[in-house]
Image (tube, rainbow, N blue to C red):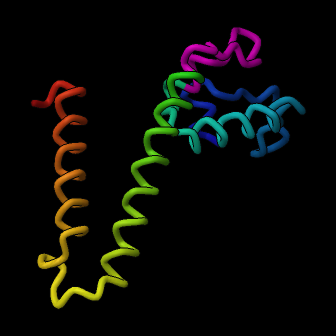
């Protein structure tokens, strides 16, 4: 909580001895922070989504972009899951002798290369 207060995500209204007192809306703010972190936003990005009064002013375009990123991640994770299951169940003597495994490795290599190029890492 101290860290969230330090970066401006929440703020206390008073102290009672050594304990800080927070307004009721801090619970909602903490839930939004947790959801934002789960969605992959940094604390700085989350802090920028909070308006002057501490209530969210979330740019919808950023949410759409992050949702698109999550869709890509889900697709990649599903492909990885399917590859692992195939490797685990493949009847070929070795995985490198399995044509399906070789094809899946080629596809994964092309995806990784395309992803790096898209991020400008050539």
Res. 15 in view: no
Q: How many marks?
A: 0
Determine which quarter of the picture holds residue 89: bottom left
Residue at image x 82%, y 29%?
A: 14
Image quadrant containing the N terminus: top right
Q: Is residue 91 above or below residue 47?
A: below
Looking at the rendered image, the quarter that the C terminus falls into is: top left
Question: Quick one: which residue is furthest to the front in this view?
Answer: 99
Report the span colored magenta. 46-62
Compared to 103, does 14 lie above or below?
above
What residue is shown at x 58% (from left), y 44% (from top)?
38
| Percent of width and height locating residue 43 | 52, 32
Quadrant in the picture for residue 27: top right
Q: Which of 6 and 121 is in front in this view?
A: 121
Would you say the magenta stretch is mainly helix, strand or loop? loop
Residue 13 image position (x, y, % from top left): 81, 26
**Considering depth in this image, is 55 or 74 the residue closer to the camera?**
74
- What residue is drawn where x is 18% and y is 79%? 95
Q: Which residue is drawn at 39% across and 49% down?
A: 76
Using the rendered image of the protein, determine whether residue 94 is visible from the camera's viewpoint. Answer: yes
Is residue 117 positioned above or below 3 on the image? above
> 23 or 45: nearer the eye?
45
């Amino acid at each position: 909580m101290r860290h969230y207060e330090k970066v401006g995500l929440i703020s206390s209204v008073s102290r009672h001895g050594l304990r800080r007192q927070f307004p009721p809306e801090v619970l909602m703010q903490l839930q939004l922070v947790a959801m934002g972190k789960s969605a992959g936003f940094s604390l700085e990005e989350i802090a920028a989504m909070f308006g002057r009064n501490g209530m969210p002013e979330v740019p919808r375009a950023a949410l759409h972009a992050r949702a698109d990123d999550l869709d890509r991640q889900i697709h990649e994770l599903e492909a990885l899951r399917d590859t692992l299951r195939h490797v685990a169940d493949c009847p070929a003597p070795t995985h490198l002798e399995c044509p399906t495994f070789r094809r899946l490795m080629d596809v994964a290599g092309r995806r990784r290369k395309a992803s790096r190029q898209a991020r400008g890492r050539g």
